[in-house]
Image: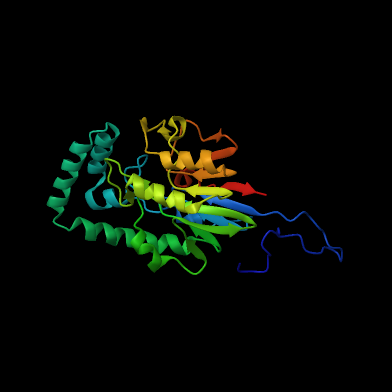
């Protein structure tokens, strides 16, 4: 870690007035998800902690609360953003795709190239905001192939991999499952299940999407069920990690619940709150 504060030690534990002030050594990790362009708060998300974990969705394609923000309104304007949100919220996905295809045709630009250019612009702002050390995995709206270009030496990117932090083993699986939204990093259920299986037993299971439990996948504002993972739920029941941490659902019916011995926690919609969730031991 950069700086003089040792891992697991709080600033202020040094000697005061010639007398060392000793406290029990603890490890504090801050966890964020669904950052969606909030670089300002991301830069301070590790304040007071030993490490930051990011569970993905750095890109802001379209803000469903403020339709003037994001890649879509930048390209097509707010009125068209209003319309696409209306269609998607009503689950009229075929109409939304037809409407979007017409907008791209009128724009006369290659969609893949235009979106990648806009995402690169956001990543150039987001990745330098990551503190050191950061452990990050992808969200469903991220483009994994670009991360290697922007992640600095203080950011460790993990997907289907494990890392030890403060004596505990953390496992990471990024991305989401196939949906009618067709966001950039959606993979087949079988591929997702294989990454979960490859982790084995961990203390803390970190994913972007939640396990497939109705209370954890239902968004009370969007008024729909998002996709959760059955394989993730099965792994939680089988391997019994201490925590399962995730995001993806911005306004969940239940932000946390216990499954056996595992505390399942939606760490929150960081783009809106600007506040990380804290894990300390």
Q: Left or right? Give the position of 80 relative to 143.
A: left
Residue at the spot 57% in from the left edge and 42% down from the top edge: 240
Q: Name the foreground residue: 194 vs 158.
A: 194
Measuring from the top left, give residue 173's x and y in whole percent.
44, 51
Residue at the spot 64% in from the left edge and 69% down from the top edge: 3
Q: Name the foreground residue: 50 vs 66.
A: 50
Q: Quadrant of the N terminus?
A: bottom right
Residue at the spot 41% in from the left edge and 32% down from the top edge: 218
What colouring method underlies this structural image?
rainbow
Residue 230 seen in the figure = yes
Measuring from the top left, give residue 42's x and y in whole percent.
50, 55
Q: Left or right? Give the position of 202 relative to 39.
A: right
- 224 up-or-down from 162: above or below: above
Residue 140 seen in the figure = no
Residue at the spot 30% in from the left edge and 34% down from the top edge: 89
Q: How many marks?
A: 0
Q: Name the foreground residue: 130 vs 155.
A: 155
Specify the quadrant of the image occupied by residue 212.
Answer: top left
Measuring from the top left, give residue 29's x and y in whole percent.
60, 53
Specify the quadrant of the image occupied by residue 169.
Answer: bottom right
- 3 up-or-down from 186: above or below: below
Q: Left or right? Give the position of 256 relative to 221.
A: right
């Amino acid at each position: 870690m950069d700086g003089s504060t040792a891992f697991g030690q709080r600033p202020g534990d040094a000697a005061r007035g010639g007398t060392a002030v000793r406290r029990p050594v603890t490890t504090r990790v801050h966890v964020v998800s669904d950052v969606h362009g909030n670089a300002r708060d991301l830069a301070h998300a590790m304040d007071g902690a030993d490490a930051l974990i990011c569970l993905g969705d750095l890109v802001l394609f379209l803000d469903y609360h403020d339709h003037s923000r994001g890649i879509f309104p930048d390209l097509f304007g707010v009125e068209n953003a209003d319309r696409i949100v209306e269609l998607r919220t009503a689950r009229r996905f075929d109409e939304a795709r037809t409407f979007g295809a017409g907008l791209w045709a009128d724009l006369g630009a290659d969609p893949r190239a235009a979106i990648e250019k806009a995402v690169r612009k956001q990543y150039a702002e987001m990745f330098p905001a990551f503190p050191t050390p950061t452990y990050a995995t992808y969200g469903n709206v991220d483009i994994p192939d670009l991360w290697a270009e922007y992640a600095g030496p203080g950011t460790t990117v993990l997907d289907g991999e494990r890392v030890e932090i403060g004596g505990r083993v953390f496992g990471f699986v990024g991305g989401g499952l196939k949906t009618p939204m067709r966001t950039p990093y959606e993979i087949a259920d079988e591929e997702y299940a294989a990454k979960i299986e490859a982790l084995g037993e961990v203390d803390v299971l970190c994913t972007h999407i939640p396990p497939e439990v109705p209370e954890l996948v239902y968004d009370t504002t969007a008024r729909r069920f998002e996709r959760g993972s059955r394989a993730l739920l099965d792994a939680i029941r089988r391997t019994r990690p201490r925590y399962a941490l995730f995001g993806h659902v911005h306004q969940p019916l239940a932000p946390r619940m216990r499954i056996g011995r595992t505390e399942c926690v939606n760490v929150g919609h960081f783009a809106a709150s600007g506040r990380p969730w804290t894990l300390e031991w």
